[in-house]
Image (cartoon, rainbow, N blue to C red):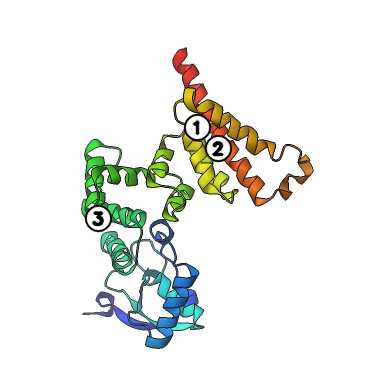
């Protein structure tokens, strides 16, 4: 075999390694405590499994793209290491893209303590690879296949899998809120029923608040039958906006975290109510 067919250990500068472009999409970084624990273990025991990278390749990824070991690289850098032996996957460089993506997903799924969303997201991506892209989520057969994959991966009921599949289509900030335990699965799934205008602005709105849980719950509650929830929703808007009503326009940037959170929650609730009312007016005409 030539070098182009064999994975080889070679030294590489850690700063020159490139994160896989899908890393953030599928897998979150370790938090600071877990990263320090990994760094301490590597410091005591050494690196048990080398980082794997892709050299110059035919699958349109940058040379030195990391396939396996994003967190190991972070831990080594935390320990002050600048150069490490890495496994260069010359055997995958010639393509096709399927085995490359499979190696990237496999390693993360096997080595990481993943939450439900990360497991489901990776499992669906693996299913798409295995099926050659035959199924689309928008098609009835494709949706049923995805639900089956999620059920098997998480060992849950069809109802639970259906909710997980909905959360995977929710704004990123809502997915993070569910993963962090700030909202329930049912609440996160219900976000998908909100008007498109609310969904398009939700990431920015939640980034502006210190309490995304309240903002998400308020927006979802405003989506329920207006006859029952309209007074309570309006009362929340009046309360939240009233907290900053006396703030001069030139001092709006100086609002406290609590005030900004209240305003974000009020805006999401108001957007949802406007969408409901507009939809009802269109149906009436």
In terms of sequence position, does the residue under pointer 1 or pointer 3 come before the other?
3
Residue at the disc numbered 3: 153
Q: Quadrant of the N terminus?
A: bottom left
Name the residue furthest top.
285
Residue at the disc numbered 2: 268
In terms of sequence position, does the residue under pointer 3 or pointer 2 come before the other?
3
> Helix, strand or loop at disc 2?
helix
- The reply to whether residue 71 is in sight is yes
- Residue at x 28% of width, y 69% of height: 92
Find residue 11 and report its horizontal and vertical position in percent.
40, 84
Find residue 247 and report its horizontal and vertical position in percent.
76, 41
Crowding near the residue tagged with mark 1, few <14, some 14–19, many ≥20 C-alpha atoms within 10 Å: many
In terms of image quadrants, where is residue 134? top left
User: In the image, 190: left or right of 126?
Assistant: right
Residue at the disc numbered 1: 222
Disc 2 vs disc 1: Cβ atoms closer than 8 Å?
A: yes
Kindly report the distance in space between the C-alpha atoms of the residues bearing marks 2 and 1.
Answer: 9 Å
- Residue at x 73% of width, y 44% of height: 252
């Amino acid at each position: 075999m030539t070098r182009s067919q064999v994975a080889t250990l070679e030294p590489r500068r850690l700063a020159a390694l490139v994160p896989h472009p899908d890393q953030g999409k599928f897998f979150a970084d370790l938090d600071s405590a877990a990263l320090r624990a990994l760094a301490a273990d590597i410091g005591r025991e050494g690196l048990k499994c080398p980082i794997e990278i892709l050299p110059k390749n035919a699958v349109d990824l940058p040379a030195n793209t990391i396939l396996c070991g994003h967190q190991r690289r972070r831990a080594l850098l935390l320990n002050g290491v600048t150069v490490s032996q890495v496994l260069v996957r010359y055997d995958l460089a010639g393509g096709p893209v399927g085995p490359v993506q499979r190696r990237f997903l496999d390693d993360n799924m096997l080595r990481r303590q993943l939450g439900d969303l990360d497991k489901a997201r990776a499992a669906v991506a693996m299913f798409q690879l295995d099926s050659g892209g035959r199924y689309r989520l928008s098609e009835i057969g494709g949706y049923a296949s995805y639900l089956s994959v999620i059920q098997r991966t998480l060992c849950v009921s069809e109802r639970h899998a259906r909710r997980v599949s909905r959360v995977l289509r929710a704004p990123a900030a809502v997915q993070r809120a569910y993963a962090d335990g700030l909202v329930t699965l049912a609440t996160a799934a219900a976000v998908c029923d909100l008007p498109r205008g609310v969904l398009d602005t939700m990431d920015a709105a939640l980034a502006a608040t210190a309490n995304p849980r309240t903002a998400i719950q308020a927006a979802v509650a405003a989506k329920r039958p207006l006859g029952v929830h309209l007074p309570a929703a309006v009362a929340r808007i009046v309360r939240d906006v009233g907290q900053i009503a006396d703030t001069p326009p030139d001092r709006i940037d100086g609002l406290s975290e609590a005030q900004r959170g209240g305003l974000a929650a009020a805006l999401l609730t108001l957007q949802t109510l406007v969408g409901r009312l507009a939809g009802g007016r269109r149906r009436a005409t």
